[in-house]
Amino acid sequence: MNAAAWFGVCGATLVGVGLFGLVTNPEPLRKILAFNLVGSGVFLMFGVVAKRGAAVGLGGDPVPQALVITAIVVAFAATAMAIALLLRLFEATGEANLDSSLSGDAKRG
Amino acid sequence: MTILLNVFTVLAVVAGAFFFLAGTVGLLRFPDTLTRLHAITKADNLGLGLIILGLLPLASGPIQALKLISVWLLVQISGAIVTQLIARAVRQGGLQE
Amino acid sequence: MTTSLALDIGLAGLILAIGTWTVFARDSLAAVIGFVGYGLLLAVIWVRLSAPDVALTEAAIGSGMTGMLLLGAAARLRTERNHATGIGLRGRVAVGVLCVMISAGLAIVILFPPESIPTLAPAVMENLAQSGLGNPVAGVLFVFRALDTLLEKVVLILALLGIWSLAPDRAWGGVPGLRIYLEPSSTLTFLAQLLPPVGIVVGVYMCWVGANVPGGAFQGGTVLAAMWLLVMIAGLRNVPPIDRFWLRFLLVIGPVIFLAIGLAGFVLADAFLAYPAGYAKPLIVAVEVALTLSIAVTLGMLGAGPPERSQHS
Amino acid sequence: MTSFLVGTAGFVLGMAALGLFGIFLRPSETDRLMAAQLLGTDSIAGLVLLSITTETPSIVDVALMLALLAAFAAVAFVRSATSGGESNVAEETRHL
């Protein structure tokens, strides 16, 4: 197993860990983090594919690398938007919680 | 001459690595927040400086060497200032110790 | 080469540990700090994967801008106690099993590549000479897949529009609610006076060399945006109200020039976003310079957040 | 020489890992912020070493980028930690 393969497995595991966090963690901020984790896992796998495509003196295939750069920028735009929405929600309701039905129960529990 | 330079590189890099070790040990063993801050900033900046000093003979040209030195200066300046900001926030109670 | 392999395995293990920490940490602030460290390490891993262009982007975005936004949000939400109850144990186990299966499937795909590994590297290198660029990744971004790059900038501006539209009505056209550091003339002032000149040089350098070696408009623009935000956080410059003409002009100048050159391609080079022969490099450099400015302003305003005060109040 | 320098890069990153694991077990915000700082400096050292060993000068640019921006995130945090708890209104008057 070469180094690229290790990073590939690492990326695959990160996707799983991130998905788990995205589904199970109730806090929106943590969901944003988990979403970024899934994204970077996918990017890493792309990076491994690019590294395997090394040819003609290049360290890696430049096409997937360029796609990853675009993807990082778009993921950042989505994250910035999500954070702004979350802060606005917090400002409007005083709670950073997605589930409106929970806010009543929460006071009790 | 090459051997001499190589010996210099190895010595400086080993000394730098030692200071990184010292910084981590300080971070783990020192008793309170302010001493720990002190440990990581001083030891790590010195470690990075020594490693960069050791790598200078191997740099591909004067511009590369200049870049290496400016990396160290940047880390030095911003590290010192950020540490001071953190320490101040701790003292004023903005950050939990 | 076993030392390198050991280093790579160590890096993979470390990033996995930090990633897992950001999901399972109890305190969200700790998770966010973990995520900033995750971004730093990811940049190192991209270097190990021979992708310095991606490493530069990740270093600028992952640890810098995302870190700033997330840490700011976590600090603002710090007083908030989260009462939300998560999924029950049975649900967690089910989700866990599904996630393990997804990971395993992906790992199998990545561990057993096809016999002949597909690569576009030879095709890129063959056609790169025509564009006059020296950096293959820049070639892909600005020549072969220029439409992606154009749309990516549009996405950034759309995100900014989305954030601005969160402003309450009375604050529309007003000043973004960037939290500034409350102690004037502190050491931060010193940092905000010292770092930006260096940062501007680095940003211009990144944009300038991007055509030939790793770097480019996005990386340069991010550094400029970070320096602008630093100056605003330190209170040395005011955050501009969002209805300023110069601000809006700079926001769109990059994509507009890019689009204009793309449309001119219909007439001059027979296709949208095609460059006339012999003029590719100067045109691309012009687009990159304009994009750097636009990206710097867009990211700076993304960091500053939605307007919160009307400018007359 | 190459494996010595790569080994040093590994050692430095290992030190960062050790610091991280030690620190993350403590319930202190400041310590965690420090651990991120430590990781920043150590990553920069690792990158510089890798740049020399792989003879890729552009890796130093990545280190330069980290040096510029790692401090930036920490500044953003300290700012929020000192002003985050205050209400919007208090801040508004401050600006007028």
Image (tube, coloured by chain):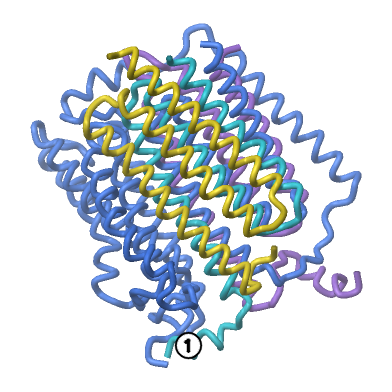
Relative horizontal placement of residue D20, taking residue C233 as reference (left or right) = right
User: Can residue D38 be spotted in the picture?
Assistant: yes
Residue B51: quadrant of the picture: top left
Q: Position of residue C54 (x, y in %)?
A: 42, 36
Chain in yellow, by letter, is B
Badge 1: few (under 14), some or many (20 or more) residues near its Cα, within 10 Å?
few
Q: Report the chain holding disc 1.
A: D
Relative horizontal placement of residue D52, taking residue C29 as reference (left or right) = left
Q: Residue at x 49, y 78 (%)?
A: C182
Amino acid type of disc 1?
Arg
User: Can residue C242 be spotted in the picture?
Assistant: no
**Mark 1 falls on what kind of element?**
helix
Image height check: is B15 above or below C250? Answer: above
Q: Position of residue D14 (x, y in %)?
A: 61, 31
Chain in cyan, by letter, is D
Q: Residue at x 29, y 76 (%)?
A: C244
Chain in purple, by letter, is A
Q: Position of residue C163 (x, y in %)?
A: 48, 67
Residue marked by disc 1: D94
Q: Residue at x 26, y 52 (%)?
A: C291
Image height check: is C13 above or below D42? Answer: above
The colour of chain C is: blue
